[in-house]
Amino acid sequence: MMEFALYCKSYRVDVRRARRLALTVDKFNADDIPFFISCPRSDLPLFQEYLGELKVTLLADEDIVLSNPLHPLSTFKEIPGHLAQQIVKSEFWRLGFAQAYLCLDSDCQFIRDFYKNEFLDLRGIPYTVIDECREILIPAATAKKQKVIDDFHKESIQVQQEIGRVGKFYNFGPNCPIWHRDVWISLDENFLKPRGLSFTDLILRHPIEMRWYGEALLKYGAIPLLPSQPFIKMYAYAWQLRKDRSDGLSEQELSQFYCGVTYQSAWEREMDWPSEGGNLASRIGRRLRRYLGRI
């Protein structure tokens, strides 16, 4: 089993984005970290067409799902896609490829050379993305986005009460965390099995996979906690990107602090496969907002 890998869960609509990500991995992966992408089995020929010449191993989502006997495919296929992808990403460890993995999204892209020691210490322990979410909550307060703050508190309370941890509210994202298989195993052994639950049950109850991982790490201590800020800058809201652009913050400046960046796929629907999603009115509206700098 390798020490560390990159992993991305994708779909056919995102195949062009996945190719862009893979191209930046090829360009900037200074330590040649193995890279895996999974998609539904029916999408594999399309991904092979778009990514076949790149240095990436393609996997079927179904093989990941079936690695847990508590996830029958018949039940899994009934779960909405935005929830199913959380389950697939969180169960990748069961295939036994790597002790730890950086969990990427299709709309990520690397912006400079990156190295394994940015993600792991000398013992092979991953740095865990954890903070009090002030990078998002303070700008949200400034922008009068109280719902962002309220949702963060609500999600924190829900999972903490479930797992039985009392203390500060932490954020374990907002995207592209590193996950270690021992933490997932500790959640499985200490929380799921005694209650007769699967990870699907947790996601259907509270669909925040990064929070389940983070709370399990804090509760059971399967690996040492090595706190880290996010590795990849995520623009979760259009007002975040507008502010950085108005401040003159470019990807070159960002690269001093992040190895990559994520722009919401909804802002670049022209990259959808096979063609830009949405009806004519929504496409025109997106282009107008982009022209006005409102994304």
Image (cartoon, helix red, strand yellow):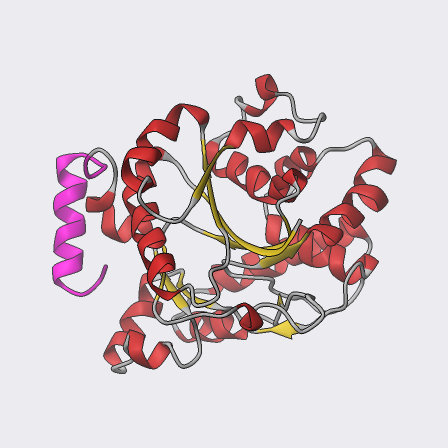
30 left or right, relative to 5 = left
Residue 204 lies, in percent from the top left, at 62, 35
- In this rendering, the answer to whether 138 lies above or below 281 is below
232 left or right, relative to 216 = left
Q: Residue at x 50, y 53 (%)?
A: 34
In the image, is residue 288 part of the stretch drawn in magenta? yes
Residue sitting nearer the eye, 242 or 11: 11
Residue 258 seen in this snapshot = yes
Residue 270 lies, in percent from the top left, at 19, 45
Q: Residue at x 38, y 58 (%)?
A: 25
- In this rendering, the answer to whether 281 lies above or below 167 is above
Residue 231 lies, in percent from the top left, at 49, 68
Residue sitting nearer the eye, 246 or 42: 42
| Residue that lies at the very extreme toward the top in this rendered image | 74
Residue sitting nearer the eye, 226 or 25: 25
Q: Residue at x 54, y 27 (%)?
A: 62
235 left or right, relative to 118 = left
- In this rendering, the answer to whether 57 lies above or below 126 is above
Residue 154 seen in this snapshot = no
Residue sitting nearer the eye, 102 or 148: 102
- The magenta region covers 275-295
Q: Quadrant of residue 150?
A: bottom right
Residue 106 lies, in percent from the top left, at 38, 48
Q: Quarter holding the C terminus?
A: bottom left
Q: Residue at x 53, y 37 (%)?
A: 83
In the image, is residue 60 part of the stretch drawn in magenta? no
212 left or right, relative to 137 = right
Q: In this figure, what is the number of numbered marks?
A: 0
